[in-house]
Amino acid sequence: MTLAHAVCGETQRALRAASLIGRYDANLPRYTSYPTAAQFMPDVGPGEWEEWLAVVPADEAASLYVHIPFCRTLCWYCACNTRAVNRSATIRSYIDLLIEEARLTQAALGRRQRVARLHLGGGTPNMVATDDLDRLFAGLREAFAFVSEPEIAAELDPSSLTRTWVRAAARNGLSRASLGVQDLSPRVQQAVNRFEPFETVSRAADWLSAADVGSLNLDLMYGLPLQTRDDLLTTLDQVTTLRPARIALFGYAHVPWLKPHQKLINEADLPGPAERFAQSQAAAAYLTDAGYQAVGLDHFALPEDSLAIAARSGRLHRNFQGYTTDDAATLIGLGASSIGRTTTGYAQNHTIERDWRAAVTEGRLPVARGLALTQDDRRRAEVIERLMCDFSVSLAEMERSQGPAPDRFSAALTRLSPLVADGLVVCENDRVSVTDLGRPFVRLICAAFDTSLAPATGRHGRMI
Ligand SMILES: C[S@@+](CC[C@H](N)C(=O)[O-])C[C@H]1O[C@@H](n2cnc3c(N)ncnc32)[C@H](O)[C@@H]1O
Ligand code: SF4
């Protein structure tokens, strides 16, 4: 095939995909879990979570997620559970309660559970003062038995990060950092109330590397107000000079009915579905040319990075933090809005910080809602996770490993027929394979297997 033919084929594929977006673009879950958090109900509370923790196997290494819901200022696009805070006493008392929640969890587990991974998410974990950070790590190490070289990751805001904080976190074992970048164009930054020149990002990357925090991820976004393809490519030109091991490229989820501060964004400034698609494709092509491997729907990693290796070997996973190499069966969430999981089900803490504080202060596990998994949920969860991670799943293999389930997926296969006709997915010999054309539509393909979707459709962000 000549280069001209290849380019022509690419262009035709892009045009075809653009025409399909009009038909299929919808508000859909990101499938960081199945069932999704929108399905969690208040019939799961502290009592259920306590029972589920009590039967976690003693020798299992669990993962910890700690949520820090504070930022210096609010970015208008932000969909995270966070708020702007400038009183250090507020953060200090939150850390005291996190340590208390860790103790309550230890009591429910009946032991210091082994822990191999810790993820500090937010919000902005680097809002925590260094002495509070030391106290938090000491409290966690008292409640849990960390393995000798745990993977410790944190989401960091370059603008409010300091060299002193990086050193304190490294002293406590930080091994991975994720820096929020989004887009470096001053016009876009003005439109979302986030001001961060490239120098701020490169300075943060230098501090992390000097402190031996080995692995760097950068978060970028497309579909932001006033953002153009040129803005995105210029941002990529700058950030790829830092050669981060991973880059996440998120499509802006505009959900003002859930996040009222997003109303500060002028909707007329938002790129439409076709432009969003063109932006995501342009960024993906740029990153592939720059030597990055596409991982799942929205991540890119250097081929030698563990995420890229996991993707190549079918061992990629998806959890509430997105794509991950973490295969732990038990995830313990601490802090307001955190979600935990055991093989029995999901449990989410109170989202409103005041309610979370009240529960922990009264000595209760602060679980507000959740969901006990049925056998059917587990099977669908496995299919959806493999589709999101590998873009392909064998329903026959699934039956072999989980026991036969004739007809379980027949309704899903029927729902997929129009997508098969449009060339987005192929269903052959019990294998469902997403085509190259269908990759951007993988959430729609997963939705065919989701029996709980209909009432919750309006709660999610746009697919593309
Ligand atoms: C906890 S924040 C990042 C850490 C840090 N607070 C910062 O902003 O630099 C996690 C990431 O979620 C992504 N994000 C936030 N709101 C989003 C939205 N509405 N749609 C898509 N991605 C979003 C951004 O890329 C952001 O960097
Ligand atoms: S993107 Fe980061 S800094 Fe901005 S509001 Fe969200 S969590 Fe805070």
Image (spheres, grey):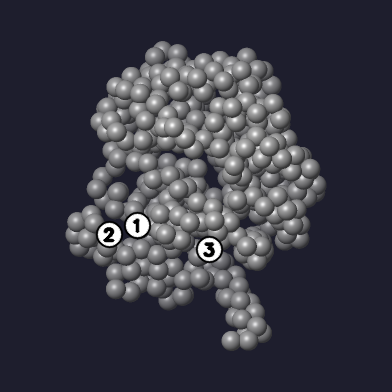
Q: Amino acid at mark 2?
A: Met
What residue is drawn where x is 70% and y is 54%? 240
Q: Amino acid at mark 1?
A: Val
- Res 398 label: 2
Q: Secondary structure at mark 1?
A: helix
> Are discs 3 and 1 less than 8 Å apart at CB?
no
Position of residue 44 relative to residue 358, above or below, is: below
Does the residue tagged 1 have its C-beta within 8 Å of any atom of ligand 1? no
Lower sequence index among marks 2 and 1? 1
> Are discs 2 and 1 less than 8 Å apart at CB?
yes
Location of mark 1 (residue): 383
Residue in the foreground of this view, choosing between 186 and 65 = 65
- Res 440 label: 3
Q: State left or right for residue 339 relative to residue 232.
A: left
What residue is drawn where x is 54% and y is 50%? 461
Position of residue 177 relative to residue 453, above or below, is: above
